[in-house]
Amino acid sequence: MGPRLQDVAAHAGVSVRTVSNVVNGFRHVAPATRSHVQASIDALGYRPNMAARTLRGSRTGLVALVVPEIDSPYFSELAARTVQIAESRGWTVLVEQTGGDAERERRLLNGKRRHLVDGVLFSPWSVSPEELSARTDTIPLVLLGEHDGTSGVDHVAIDNVEAARAATEHLIASGRRRIAAVGVQSHLFNATSRHRLRGYRRALAEAGLSSSPELEMAVETLHRGDGHRAMLELLELAEPPDAVFCFTDELALGALRAAADRGVPVPESVALVGFDDIEDGRFSIPALTTVAPDKRRIAELALDCLAEQGTHAAGRSIIAPHKLVVRHSG
């Protein structure tokens, strides 16, 4: 017979309730206490009895993470952090990929996994805010990213308007005046692109610079190929930009390759700033300046939300931190 909750409590010198709170990921545990209890859990090799949990409280110990593209570096890095944090809390993560397909998102939103998981972390692209708000399934749900117009659903995101404004301000401060934006996606209900466009425009307006439709490049997806195509179009303009703010690092990496293909030096002739701080951008030549969302904190806050649901009114908007990382591309 393996170690019990009581054994961990005795080893750590705390109450059984405190150990239970740590195991179940409840937020209101002091960091030092959580670390101390986790050390006892690790030392004793304690593992929560998922079968007993299920019998007592219809809990499975499983959490679903639903993302559009698991092969996207941003989502794969976020998934890795979510798995690590969930595991430290005694949970297992099931990862689902929707491809941004509206029908697949609807099926997962409306309980396809109802009997398998205790909660869902969900990053939808294609279902409308009205559908998200009108959801009838009772399984705990936390949305990842910006989703304007939803009500009654918790969501965790960074402040994309402020992040985009800071990225654009950085380019303006370096002396750039004709700044393009690559990543407009007006065809998606997900509001992230709109918020980044708003922050970009705000920074230009605050600096007395006008935005131009020919410099706001729409893309179908957020991949390297889309960034490459958009940058080639920008470089063909009668007056090409002297800086480009890309809404993802993947777009920026594609733009960087397009500049190299045309013999345009970065950052001497055109500066580049990306978004997401993916690993590839740290090793590109030049290394990408980028907005870095705190992916670990996003995962922690989202899992906290799942653990707390039922103890607060749903519909919270929780902001995770971000920072601008200045490297060599701009």
Image (cartoon, rainbow, N blue to C red):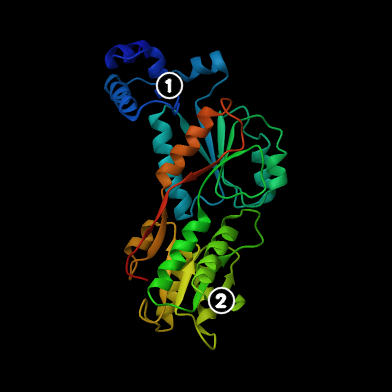
Task: Residue 43 in the image: state x and y as whole percent.
Answer: 26, 22
For label 2, the SS is loop
Task: Residue 304 in the image: state x and y as whole percent.
Answer: 48, 33
- Front residue of 317/133: it is 317
> Which quadrant is home to the C terminus?
bottom left
Q: Is the residue 128 above or below the residue 176 in the image? A: above
Task: Residue 262 in the image: state x and y as whole percent.
Answer: 43, 83
Q: Can residue 249 be seen in this view?
A: no
Q: Is the residue 24 above or below the residue 17 in the image? A: below
Please indicate whether residue 53 sits to the left or right of residue 29 in the image: right
Task: Residue 258 in the image: state x and y as whole percent.
Answer: 45, 77
Instruction: Select label 1 or label 2 by which is in front.
Output: 2
Residue at x 49%, y 14% (from the top left corner): 52
Residue under circle 1? Answer: 21
Residue under circle 2? Answer: 210
Please, what is the three-letter code of the amino acid marked with disc 2?
A: Ser
Residue at x 40%, y 82% (from the top left corner): 264
Q: Is the residue 114 above or below the residue 82 in the image? A: above
- Residue 128 - label: none
Residue at x 51%, y 69% (from the top left corner): 206
